[in-house]
Every structure is written in structure tokens, then in C-alpha cells.
Amino acid sequence: MRSMWKGAISFGLVTIPVKLYSATEEKDVSFHQVHREDGGRIRYRRVCSVDGEEVSYGDIAKGYELSTGETVVLTDEDFADLPLKTSKTIDVLQFVPLEQVDPIYFNRSYYLEPDRAGTKPYVLLRDALQGSGQVALVKVALRTREQLATLRVRDGVFVLETMLWPDEVRTPSFPFLDEDVEVRPQELSMAGSLIDTLTGDFDPSQFKDDYREALQAVIDAKIEGHEVVAPGPAQEEPGAVVDLMAALRASVEAARKGRPGGGMEDGSATSESASAGGGSAEGGSADGGSADGGKRASRGKEEPARKGSGGDEGQGERPAKRARRRTA
């Protein structure tokens, strides 16, 4: 890994020199925009809208547009003169319990490595913080922008989690929040049973990006010139939900069957059989438009999903058909 920032953790009168590294990486199949006919790369030119001339990167500044249409031009010198004391310092503000920090605030994760001279104070603060069960709330400036962040310990290394400012988190405002939706105790109990059935320990190694693997397989097949294997039959999508209790019960049963030694326990779903059988009208209204949802589901089978990030490649069955035509 290559460090992207050098500075120091400021903890009271203690200064710990550190290097910062990106702790995560997004693994995706990257594409270039090309000409469909010959595969030539599409290039973009930076052109001034006033004189029509191409502008070199060194002559580009940042502009803040006013409501009058005029622009305030800010140069690198303007940003360099800003009084940003956290430009080279991770300033510890206070220590807080981790559970009090809503995950919605977290943005990016970075590892902190100590310089050789700062190893002992680094380890000292690390062990003390880990023993406290809390995280450090800090301020730091990365890429000329001051950010709030937390400092915690993971695998013996400090992890800096940059955060959004409170005014950057939107307040949810949706019509259903003002509606008086009635949830029956039986439905709540069945939903809780489904949660209990699916409860387990978090193991991220159990999950993978199926879309990325399928897309890479299409690309590899095109490279090798082989016929692309047609995708397997799609799983049957559920029809319109008529009874909420029946849907919950079916979900619990399917979840239990999917586990070793699964299966419905005797009497686990019989207590609600009467209400489930005669509550279709109420269940339908709680679903809120399931018939329309069924139409959308049927349309989803006919029309492949469209994603801007992948272009035409890897969407539905179209890449497979195109590959067959070219290899033929």
C-alpha cells in the first residue's frame, strides 16, 4: 500500500507521527467509453465556454457561481491561505461509546501506521483506547476539506473512519410516516419468528458479488472466442401477496428448510391458521398495492435491468446473444 497522507495524532500533549492509507478498495469491472464500430477510445477535451479554446490542467481553477450568474474564481493559493489547523493533525476532541455513533455518519475508512519514532506512543494509545471500549472523536483535514472522524482499533491498527457532518445527513420525510398503519400482534410475532430463524453470526466471507463474476465470465468468453453459456433459469418471482400472515409464515418455513435440521416445528404456525385463512382482505390492504407490484414483477421478467455503470455489457441475456453472433 502507498501512503496518501502524513501527519500526527494530537492526544493532549502527546504527538504521534503517522501515515494514512486507504483501508478499502472497490472491486469492480472497469470500462472505457469506446466507439461501437471500431473500439476506439472516446477522448474528452477541456474547452472554455467563453473563447472555445482548450485549457491545460494547470490553468484550471475552481469557480463559485453566484445567483446573479457571476463567478468567484478561487485558486490554489486561496485554499492554501485558509486557517486549517487540522491540515497535518488528527486532533482528538473526546472519547465516546461506539454504539452512540449512528453508522449513517460513516464515510470512508483509513489505516494509520506509526512512524518509527512514534511506535511506542501509538501502541500506548491503541491499547488504552481498546481497553476503554470507546472510540476517539477527532477532526482531520484530508484533500483540503476538514472532516469529523472516529478513531478505533481493528486488528491491532488504528482505523480512521471519516464522517459526514450533521447537516449533511438528510431527515427522512415520507407520506407513510404520517399514516396510521395497524400491525396485528400475530403479524408482529410471525415477523419476529422469521428474524429469529435467519439470525446468525456475521461472516462476510459467505457473500460474493455474483454480478461481477458473471460479467467477468462474459468478458473472458469474448477474449477466448468461445460460446457464452446461457444463464440458468431465473428463480420464479413471487406473485401478488394477498395475505401478509401467509407470506410471513411461508418465509419462516422456507428459511427453516434451508438450514441443516430445518423444518417447521410442531404447532409453530398453527396458532395463526384461522386468522391467516380469513384475513385476506386486511392482509391485502396492509400490503398496499400488491396487484400493481405483480405487474411490475412481470414486466421485470420481460425487460432486462439497465445500469449506467456497465453500459451494454453484462446486462441480462443481451451480451450472451451478442457473443454468439460474433463468434459464429
Image (cartoon, rainbow, N blue to C red):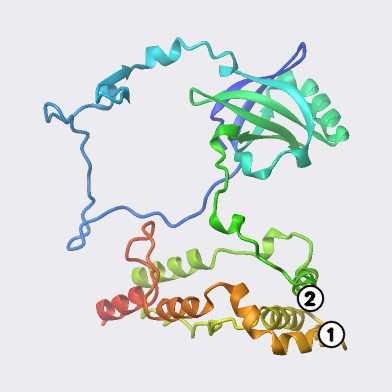
Can residue 263 be seen here? The reply is yes
- Marks 2 and 1: in contact by CB < 8 Å? yes
Q: Name the residue nearer the viewer: 203 or 238.
A: 238
Q: Tag 2's secondary structure?
A: helix
Amino acid type of the residue tagged 1 in the rendering:
Ser
Circle on res. 186: 2
Q: Is residue 225 visible?
A: no
Can you tell which mark lies on residue 271? Answer: 1
Give SS at disc 1: helix
Where's residue 258, x and y in %? 73, 81
Q: Is residue 97 above or below residue 321?
A: above
Residue 296, given in percent of the width and then of the height, sits at 44, 76
Residue type highlighted by circle 2? Gln
Residue at x 50% of width, y 82% of height: 234
From the viewer's perspective, tell me whether residue 195 is left or right of residue 283: right
x 18%, y 29%: residue = 48
- Front residue of 291 and 154: 291
Left or right of 212: which side holds 189?
right
- Neighbours of disc 1 within 10 Å: few (<14), some (14-19), many (20+): few
Depth check: give the residue in front, 190 or 50. Answer: 190
Give the quadrant of residue 20: top right
The quarter in which the C terminus is drawn is bottom left
The quadrant of the image that shows the N terminus is top right
**Mark 1 and mark 2: span between their CA atoms?**
9 Å
